[in-house]
Image (tube, grey):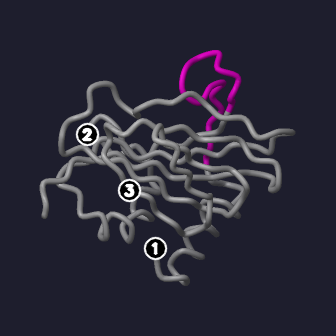
Amino acid sequence: FLDKTIFNELKKILLKNDNFPYFFIDHKINEGDGFPQFVHQFYYGQTINSEYYHLLDPILDKLNPTSLIRIKINLQMKDTQIRMTGMHNDFDDPLENQKTGIFYMNTNNGKTIFEDGEEIDSVENRMVIFPASKRHAGTTHTDTMYRCVINFNWIWYGE
């Protein structure tokens, strides 16, 4: 999705930097769901919430959103088995022109699964974009130390 040099710089800062601030939450979709993860909120509530927001400019330039809703990075640790999280939409009652994008920061055996059965492998530097009304789920992974994705939610009125 991104030029390899730009992607590697992004990966170096987000995944190879001891000082990048991740915050632990005890759930993925709903409290008590058994899928803890680390997150960093770049953008939410019409506000830039991170001094690292500018790192996403190359992705945002390609997405060309009309209006951002949320951008966050999710980092899950290795599991002992592949388990699927609950099917969901990132937001209740998404708008017609609302989009969701998942940008994969590393390759692993985790997947994104859609309600219609379509499966997307986690391959680094891949972006999958879909209508926000399309229900989806993630899975855990077993083959790497972590699985990391950046989740984008936006409104787009382009062609």
Q: Residue furthest top?
A: 32
Question: Which residue position is annotated with label 2?
Answer: 46
Image depth: mark 1 or mark 3 in front = 3
Q: Nearer the viewer, residue 85 or 152?
A: 85
- Residue 13 x %, y %: 60, 65
Range drawn in magenta: 21-36
Quarter holding residue 97: top left
Image depth: mark 3 or mark 2 in front = 3
Which residue shows up at 83% across the image and 39% down it? 81
- Residue 86 x %, y %: 56, 27
Q: Indicate which disc, 1 or 2, sits on the residue closer to the N terminus.
A: 1
Q: Of helix, strand and loop, which one carries label 3?
A: strand
The amino acid beneath tag 2 is Gln
Question: Which residue position is annotated with label 3?
Answer: 129
- Residue 96 x %, y %: 18, 40
| Discs 1, 2 touching: Cβ within 8 Å | no
- Residue 17 x %, y %: 68, 61
Q: Residue furthest front?
A: 116
Q: Of helix, strand and loop, which one carries label 2?
A: loop
Number of numbered tags placed on the structure image: 3
Quarter holding residue 34: top right
Residue 1 disc label: 1
> Is 67 left or right of 38, judged from the image as shown?
left
The amino acid beneath tag 3 is Ile
Q: Nearer the viewer, residue 106 or 51?
A: 106
Callout 3: 10 Å neighbours few (<14), some, many (20+)?
some
Q: Indicate which disc, 3 or 2, sits on the residue closer to the N terminus.
A: 2
Callout 1: 10 Å neighbours few (<14), some, many (20+)?
some
